[in-house]
Amino acid sequence: MEEAQDSHITLDPLGDLLLLVGEGENQMTFLVSTKAMRLASSVWRIMLQPLGQFKEARPENGQVLFPDDDAQALQIVLSIAHLEFHSIPETLSFTQLLNLAIICDKYDTARLIRPWFHRWEKSFENSATDLGHEQSLLIAWVFRDLDTFKLVANSLVRTIRVNFQGGGVARQGLPPLGEHMPPGIIENILKARLATIRSFTAVIDSFVRRYEPSTFKPGSIVCRAERNQKACHAMMYGSLIMAIERAGLQKNEVSVYTPSINSIVDEFYKILESSEFFEYPSLNYSSHSQCNFQSAWKSQLGYVMNTIPSGYTVAHLDHFKMSEKNSLS
């Protein structure tokens, strides 16, 4: 790829169109062949069709503006479209790969880029679930990396937190997630998150119902020691309520839980392991060692964590399964 200046790239010396990409100091220009662009992209095929209805088909002074596009990402797509393979970078940062995915999604050029995706695939997959890389979902979606897509979607079910006041959905310490996500994925991640929290609260409520004061009547006391049954029962109930409050899972407030599932579970396990979880003292004639519900609670919480719903739907999987249409024909 011949390069007269950093800001001007000649992809076809006989090109019939000058693209002005980006704005201000970051703007780059590309001398290109509209025929190569039409062959590379179904969007460009319509946009640049001779005598077409779009303004790009009738450029003033042979120039077309792409002010909203990332110039470096578009350069990769244009270089491949013009068979300038030697200029394709060996490595891309996460941001560069995301910008490339955005361009490919916008102009339907993923099929063109996909054979080169393996160059950047390993480093992408190794960091896909890192904080700040939530938009790995779009990269995996565009370039049909199903395993990474599943991994990131399921990770986000566990790690996102919700700010109901501001309506934001984010991971700890990061700005809200929003644009550049596959269709419907955030909604389904939130749905899976809420279903998991409801499963947690169902476990909690089942224990609360066993220990709450209304059950203090003959035959309903959980404690089976020979003596001090009501005192033991009350101590377990108090410990249970303390655990719920410390974990931020107050009863009947499922819809406003803001912490991530991982942080809720971590807090629960810290509480379950702490010395603040009280047990009625056992005496020689009356043992209360079997009254503590920590083991049973851990087991049920573990089951919930092992059965968290997927962050994606069948419709998302169909995107990966369906045979790719020949968009270039």
Image (cartoon, rainbow, N blue to C red):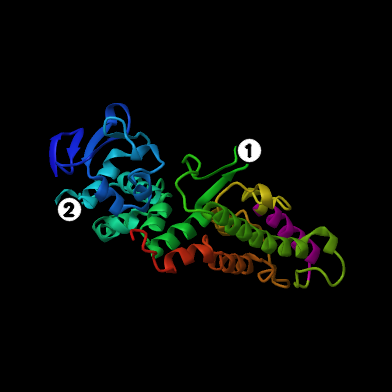
Which residue does the numbered mark 1 point to in the structure image? 165
Query: Identity of the amino acid at label 1?
Result: Gln
Q: How crowded is mark 1: few (under 14 residues within 10 Å), some or many (20 or more)?
A: few
- The part of the chain drawn in magenta is 227-243
- Determine if the magenta segment contains residue 240: yes
Query: Against 222, is 114 above or below?
Result: above
83 or 171: nearer the viewer: 83
Q: Relative to 183, is 280 on the left or the right?
A: right
- Give the number of the disc on residue 85: 2
> Percent from the top left, x then y, of residue 153?
47, 58
Q: Main SS of the magenta segment?
A: helix
Where residue 33 appears, as percent x and y from the top left, is 23, 45
The structure residue drawn at horizontal position 34% and vertical position 55%, both measured from the top left corner, is: 110
User: Which part of the image, by quadrant, shows the C terminus?
Assistant: bottom left
Apparent side of residue 310 relative to residue 83 in the rendered image (left or right): right
How far apart are labels 2 and 1 at the CA level? Answer: 49 Å
Q: In which quarter of the image is the N terminus?
A: top left
Left or right, 185 with respect to 217, comes to: left
**Residue 76 forms part of the magenta stretch:** no
> Does the rendering let one see residue 280?
no
Instruction: Name which residue lies at 62% across and 42% down.
Output: 164
- Residue 250: give x, y in percent of width and height: 69, 50
Q: What residue type is labelled 2?
A: Phe
